Image (cartoon, rainbow, N blue to C red):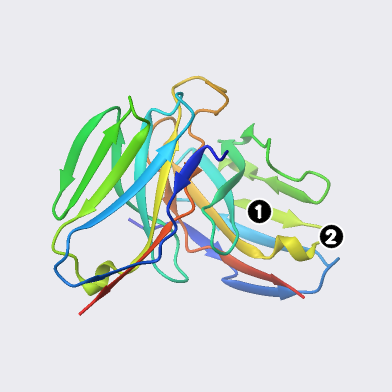
Amino acid sequence: EAGVAQSPRYKIIEKRQSVAFWCNPISGHATLYWYQQILGQGPKLLIQFQNNGVVDDSQLPKDRFSAERLKGVDSTLKIQPAKLEDSAVYLCASSFGGDQPQHFGDGTRLSIL
Amino acid sequence: QKEVEQDPGPLSVPEGAIVSLNCTYSNSAFQYFMWYRQYSRKGPELLMYTYSSGNKEDGRFTAQVDKSSKYISLFIRDSQPSDSATYLCAMSGLRGANAGGTSYGKLTFGQGTILTVHP
């Protein structure tokens, strides 16, 4: 079974620039999650999708972050404009939904200069 | 106070030792408990997944949940150098959105414990 695919693996940008991350979940997984993991901390949920719809975006900084999941499969997460404190690893996870376990991709490591 | 507290370590043990990793939590709505292992520059990998109180064993790994004390543990027997990684506890709530302040399926993680097993 192919895992969760994410790209790019690394990204370096200057503050105030924009950046986008892409995620392809495990086939058949209806639920998709984006997490932010700051160095030395556990992942923190940014947004949760169930098929095309948003279930939880309460911790997404909506003034600068946006995410979409077109056709209920792939998803993109965008930051515009980036701030220094956005330096982190952005992890995508997927599951069949509900209480089913989540499986993570290897993340995109973002550095803001 | 954080919802999930985990001692960040670092923890260094000799090969063959028994390792004990622990988390405490404050939100009584948490019902599902997980342990993830994260190698450097990789995503978290699910190790153990339990529901409610009790023990669950899988090979060298044993997960314990004590809901009355709001305390979960992961034990690693006969630890190996390949077990060297960051271990993350995670938990989620009941069916139904926004149960007890946590939405269904949302994982709340501990800080992670860095484990090194030396030969």
Q: Which residue is mark 1?
A: A76
Q: Residue A48: horizontal and vertical position, in percent?
A: 58, 39
Q: Residue B27: horizontal and vertical position, in percent?
A: 49, 28
**Circle 2 SS class:** loop
The subunit letter for the residue under badge 2 reads A
Q: Which residue is mark 2?
A: A81
Cα distance in 3D space between marks 2 and 1: 16 Å
Q: Is residue A27 visible?
A: no
In the image, residue B108 sits, relative to residue A80, either above or below, namely: above
Q: Is residue B65 left or right of residue A102?
A: left
- First in sequence: mark 2 vs mark 1: 1
Q: Residues within 10 Å of mark 2 (few under 14, many from 20)?
A: some
In the image, residue B23 sits, relative to residue B99, either above or below, namely: below
Q: B48 or A17, which is in the foreground?
A: B48
Q: Residue A13: horizontal and vertical position, in percent?
A: 76, 74
Residue shown at 30%/27% (left/top)?
B52
* Quadrant of the rendering where the C terminus of chain A is positioned: bottom right
Residue shown at 57%/50% (left/top)?
A35
Q: Is residue A92 left or right of residue A11?
A: left
Q: Is residue A45 visible?
A: yes
Q: B112 or A72, which is in the foreground?
A: B112
Residue A48, label in figure:
none
Residue shown at 74%/61% (left/top)?
A85
Residue shown at 58%/48% (left/top)?
A44
* Quadrant of the rendering where the N terminus of chain A is positioned: bottom left
Q: Which of pointers 2 and 1 indicates the residue nearer the eye? A: 2
Q: Residue B82: horizontal and vertical position, in percent?
A: 25, 72
Residue type at numbered disc 1: Thr
Residue type at numbered disc 2: Pro
Q: B60 or A69, which is in the foreground?
A: B60
